[in-house]
């Protein structure tokens, strides 16, 4: 499983979080942008709360138990 605060970046990480309904926190630089469940992921984007986040622009952090 993933640790609270662990960065996720690989397709497998996104799939694990989506299928297990583990929330992710999203940052743009050091600024918090959003938190929620992954609804979709692809090579370039991750969808959380009906918003598409660019995987190159944003950082995704695991938040199990949130």
Image (cartoon, rainbow, N blue to C red):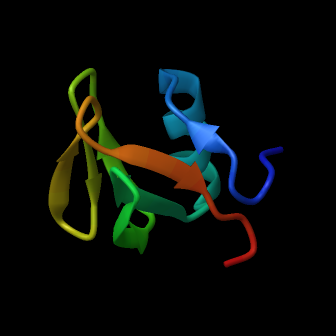
Residue 55 figure quarter: top left
Residue shown at the point (72%, 65%) measured from the top left: 64
**Residue visible at 26% across and 70% down in the picture:** 49
Furthest residue to the bottom? Answer: 66
Residue 28 position by quadrant: bottom left
Q: Quadrant of residue 32?
A: bottom left
What x and y, as percent, mark residue 30? 40, 58
Q: Image check: 33 left or right of 10?
A: left
Quarter of the figure that contains the C terminus: bottom right
Residue 39 position in % (x across, y down): 34, 55
State the residue at coordinates (64%, 54%).
20
* Residue 4: % across, % down: 75, 59
Residue nearest the viewer, comparing 12 with 26: 26
* Residue drawn where x is 16% and y is 61% of the image: 51
* On screen, residue 32 above or below 17: below
Single out the residue that lies furthest toward the front. 30
Say if 54 sits above or below 9 in the image: below
Q: Quadrant of the N terminus?
A: top right
Q: Is residue 26 left or right of residue 45?
A: right
* Residue 27 x, y percent position in the rendering: 38, 57
């Amino acid at each position: 499983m993933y640790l609270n605060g662990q960065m996720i970046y690989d397709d497998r990480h996104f799939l694990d979080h989506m299928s297990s309904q583990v929330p992710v926190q999203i940052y743009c630089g050091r600024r918090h942008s959003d938190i929620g469940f992954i609804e979709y992921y692809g090579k370039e984007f991750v969808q959380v709360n009906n918003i598409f986040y660019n995987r190159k622009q944003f950082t995704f952090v695991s938040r199990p138990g949130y």
